[in-house]
Amino acid sequence: MSELSRKIEALLFISSSPVTERELKEALNVSGREVSLALDELGRILDGENHGILLRSLAGGWVLETRPELSDITANFRADSRSKHIRLSKAAIETITVIAHKQPVTRSEIDDIRGVNSASPVARLLELGLIRTAGRKKEGRPSLLYATTQKFFEVFGINDMSDIPAIDEIDIQQEE
């Protein structure tokens, strides 16, 4: 396989939507003819070597797709992975970042850092299993302490605490 075909394959692989020949041409700084020839080569290779994916023209661009004959296995897998997919609001992301850095931390301490009430994001993060109660604060008013869970590391693809962005790298909303 040519180097250009390999590069095109990599770009199509990471793209979540069809990629036009023009986008490929500009990204790779090559001619339209070179892109066209490399796409033909990639298509032939994926068709001829019994791959699990194929190259397809779609909506004015190109995509890599799973072969239709493998739809049973991919449908089951997608259903499983969709149930693992988690969507978080900006408030929840801010909240979990504060918890990750300051753990164990009380909700009032989170509120002070964020400048807004964090009850809803904390409840959502608990529900999703991304944080847990880590005991109660002994001094002052007894309050629950929160910390991250192993699931937090798995969902965010984090190996250890050093991979977590610094608090000053996130946009914390301050109430006026």
Image (cartoon, rainbow, N blue to C red):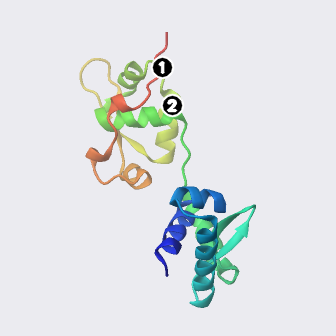
Q: Residue at x 64, y 58 (%)?
A: 22
- Any part of residue 19 in sight: no
Count of labels in the image: 2
Asked if disc 2 and disc 1 are in contact, CB closer than 8 Å, the reply is yes
Which label sits on residue 102? none
Image-quadrant location for residue 33: bottom right
Q: Nearer the viewer, residue 120 or 101?
A: 101
Q: Position of residue 23 (x, y in %)?
A: 61, 56
- The residue lying furthest to the top in this view is 176
Q: Position of residue 45 (x, y in %)?
A: 57, 85
Q: Which residue is mark 2?
A: 91
Image quadrant where residue 145 sits: top left
26 over 111 or under it: above or below: below
* SS type, badge 2: helix
- Badge 1 marks a residue whose secondary structure is loop
Of pointers 2 and 1, the one earlier in the residue sequence: 2
Q: Nearer the viewer, residue 45 or 21?
A: 21
Q: Is residue 113 above or below residue 90?
A: above
Local packing at callout 1 (Cα closer than 10 Å; few below 14, some 14-19, many 20+) is: some
Q: Amino acid at mark 2?
A: Ala
Q: Whole-percent x and y of residue 34? A: 59, 71
Q: At label 1, which amino acid type do we have?
A: Val
Relative placement, left or right, of 79 versus 135 is right
Q: Name the spot of residue 37 as percent of width and height, x first.
A: 61, 76
Question: Cα distance, mark 2 to mark 1?
Answer: 9 Å
The tag on residue 116 is 1
* Residue found farthest to the right: 59
Question: Residue at position x 33%, y 43% from top?
Answer: 164
Q: Is residue 130 above or below residue 73?
A: above
Residue at screen point 54% across, 66% down: 13
The extreme left residue here reads: 139
Res 157 visible? yes
